[in-house]
Image (tube, rainbow, N blue to C red):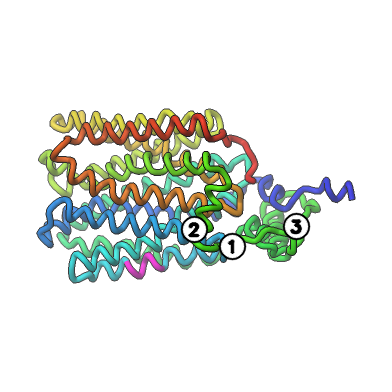
Amino acid sequence: MNNYLKLPTGESIVQNLPWKWGVQGKIFVIGGLGFMFDAWDVTLNGALIPLVAAEWGLDRTTAALLGTGNLLGMALGAFLWGTIADKIGRKKAFTWTLLIFSIFTVAGALAPSFAWFVAFRFIAGVGLGGCIPVDYALVGEFTPAKQRGRVLTAMDGWWPIGAALSFFISGWVQATTGNWRLILAVMVLPALLVFWIRRSVPESPLYLVRAGQRDKAAKVIDDLVTRTGAEAKPYTLPDPASAPRLSAGSWLDQLVKVWRFSPKITLVSWSLFLTILLVYYLALTWMPSILSDAGMAQSTALFMTSVMALMGLIGVAIAALLVEKVGRKWLLGVTGPLSAFILVLVAVTINAPTIALVWMLVFGVVIQVAIPVLYAYISELYPTELRSSGFGWASSFSRLGAGFGPLLFAALWPVFGLGNLFLAAGALVVAAVILMAFFAPETKGRALQ
């Protein structure tokens, strides 16, 4: 009995396997491609707003409803799919998110009016909104503990790629055809390809263990051990009758569970998600319009915003290098507020285009140090049975803020000015960082619960 109790658990076996690009790396790439499309779609709002406004004769605030509808759909999707993943498994949820997105993106390209277009973008957002919480849960649970922080941080490298592709292709299509509907059509075929590839991803053994599926969990774990070349060791799995099962329950029940687990951690998670991503979504949504208002051609403004987004690859690399050395809290505490205040510098130098563009590029780097660390950090704060739901709720809350934030920004922009609005956003980030400093633990090197 004593020897049995000393056996490692199946979960610890998975978390201590050697990293292999052909095993965990493949899951990282497949999950990252879905993450790329999330970035592509969110970024597309900033490109489409001025284009649809011109076609349907909309003012800036009305056109901003496009981004609001899409992000609200993503907010709903982030919660729904995170909860669904806790019920049916990461793999099934992981696969279906992109299919729903693809179908309604095609519908959006055929929309006969602005109202229908917003409705289709909302539903497409519901599908794609599940990518981040589901992908992070799946990739994180396959990744060895020693590399988990770096891998989850590197996941965000797909975001600047997707954002840059979105602005670049939008600018190219606009410059060559002038047809914004083709911008939507371009992204559907690769999204469907990723949907097909995702079918080969195995189910998370951590999910199977929690769900009480001993045989399936053991098969996945044994296969991972064999494919990574690790030494086969005996391990324990909980009895199905005693293992806690993952139940989606009602919306209210999930919300209660997340807050009951730790009100402080959930407060911190929601605050960080809301404020840091609000800053980024404000930049993505309105930077093309800001540059156009400053006298830049529309296609050029899209290309320059694409370069800003692509600079995020440098930020992700910096985050990956520092996340295990410095820790999650310190990186968030510095880069979160700094990114907002760099946007203030963009606003105050907008009439000096060269200087403003330099600050834009710096912003692209700094914000993408903060965001991947944020995702890795929040995903590590919750136990397995609440990881998707906890992350999904935080992501949903951020999408609500990001959905209404740009809309409010459009209304207040002429009244208070760009600099003051970006400064207010920075103050919100500072408040969230202070909450984190007092209420949330550092998770560097800590095993998943």
Range of residues picked out in magenta: 100-104
Q: Residue 122 vs residue 264: left or right?
A: left
Under circle 1, the secondary element is loop
Under circle 3, the secondary element is loop
In the depicted structure, whether residue 384 falls above or below residue 417: below
In the depicted structure, whether residue 29 falls above or below residue 271: below
Which of 278 and 369 lies nearest the eye of the viewer? 278
Q: Is residue 83 visible?
A: yes
Q: Tell me which numbered mark, 3 or 1, is placed earlier along the sequence.
A: 3
Which of 58 and 315 lies nearest the eye of the viewer? 58
Measure how far apart labels 1 and 2 are at the Cα level.
13 Å
Which residue is the site of mark 2?
A: 252
Q: Tell me which numbered mark, 1 or 2, is placed earlier along the sequence.
A: 1
Residue 49 at x, y = what percent?
20, 54
Measure how far apart labels 3 and 1 are at the Cα level.
17 Å
Which residue is the site of mark 1?
A: 247
Which residue is the site of mark 3?
A: 238
Which of 132 and 298 lies nearest the eye of the viewer? 132
Q: Amino acid at mark 1?
A: Ser
Q: Amino acid at mark 2?
A: Leu
Measure how far apart labels 3 and 2 are at the Cα level.
29 Å
Residue occupying image coordinates x 19% and y 36%: 418
Residue 66 at x, y = what percent?
24, 57
